[in-house]
Amino acid sequence: MSPRLIGFLIHLLTASGATLGLAALFCAVEGRFALMFAWLGAALVVDAVDGPLARRFRVTETVPHIDGVALDLVVDFLNYVVTPLVALWRSGLLEPSLAGAVCAFVAGASALYFADRRMKTPDLWFRGFPALWNVVVFYLLLLRPEPVWTLVVALGAAGLMFAPIVFVHPLRVAVMRRVTLAVTAIWGAAAIAAVAQDLSAASPAVKAALVATACYFIVLPLFRERSAVNFGGVDG
């Protein structure tokens, strides 16, 4: 198989994430949230493997007319922002009078975040909360807080996208890499179990595992080398 064909197939794999995301979006509109996350989970697997494949087969050289970064951002914005925000709008977790406005605000703020060239630090941490609204909405549907707390979480996470803090990229950050990969695997298994158990009906053990792993990812930036941080510069 020619390198050019391999490169095109890898781009096609990335683009398939949009197909999976659209299926998830349809489920979100219908209020079928567990199935929505099943589709988003499949898209997440695609997102996890297409990058390493693209780097391994040098698709920027073999298929230079397709911008893989732009393609990835388009797919990610659908799967990480638009679809979960539709689910949040349809879920009843926000006051109906506020739901549309809050979701619209978060979508606009997330668009700005995705366009920020400083989204990642040189050591591959995310600068600010990385607009993972699929994860935020997953936890909100899992725990079902009161509408006021959902509002606080949504607005707080939106503000954190532009805060001078870092969040881990679990597959690429080197700090405590083996532990982080193990915790990511535990989170993935617990998330699959929660989806299979229809989210809010998940067992206490599953919910506890998901909360514990979330705490790990929140605390992990404390172990980052402070010398790698330079919030005052464009490149750092």
Image (cartoon, helix red, strand yellow):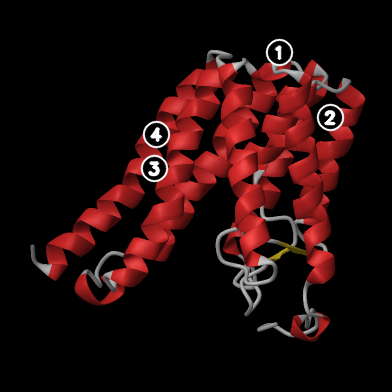
Name the residue type under label 4.
Leu
- Residue marked by disc 3: 17
Dot 1 or dot 2, earlier in sequence: 2
In the displayed structure, 153 sits above or below 122; it is above
Res 164 visible:
no
Q: Residues within 10 Å of mark 1 (few under 14, many from 20)?
A: some
Marks 1 and 3, how far apart at CA: 28 Å
Q: State whether residue 170 is above or below residue 83.
A: below
Which residue does the numbered mark 4 point to in the structure image? 20
Dot 4: within a 10 Å radius of its alpha carbon, few (fewer than 14), some, or many (20 or more) residues? many
What residue is drawn where x is 26% and y is 50%? 12
Left or right side of 10 for 201: right
Which amino acid is tagged 3? Answer: Gly
Which one is in front in this view, the residue at disc 1 or the one at disc 3? 1
User: Which one is closest to the eye, mark 1 or mark 2?
Assistant: 1
- The residue pinned by badge 2 equals 150
Question: How far is the residue under mark 4 from the one under mark 2?
Answer: 27 Å
Tell me the number on the disc at residue 201.
Answer: 1
**Which residue shows up at 79% across the image and 86% down it?**
227
**Given the image, on which type of amino acid does mark 1 rest?**
Ala
Q: Is residue 123 left or right of residue 150?
A: left
Q: Residue 195: which quarter of the image?
A: top right
Determine contact: label 4, label 2, CB under 8 Å: no
Whether tag 1 and tag 3 are in contact, CB under 8 A, the answer is: no
Asked if marks 4 and 3 touch (Cβ < 8 Å), the reply is yes
Q: Check whether the beta carbons of the residues at disc 4 and disc 1 lie within 8 A of each other.
A: no
Q: Quadrant of the N terminus?
A: bottom left
Query: Which mark is first along the chain, 3 or 2?
Result: 3
Sequence-wise first label, 4 or 1: 4
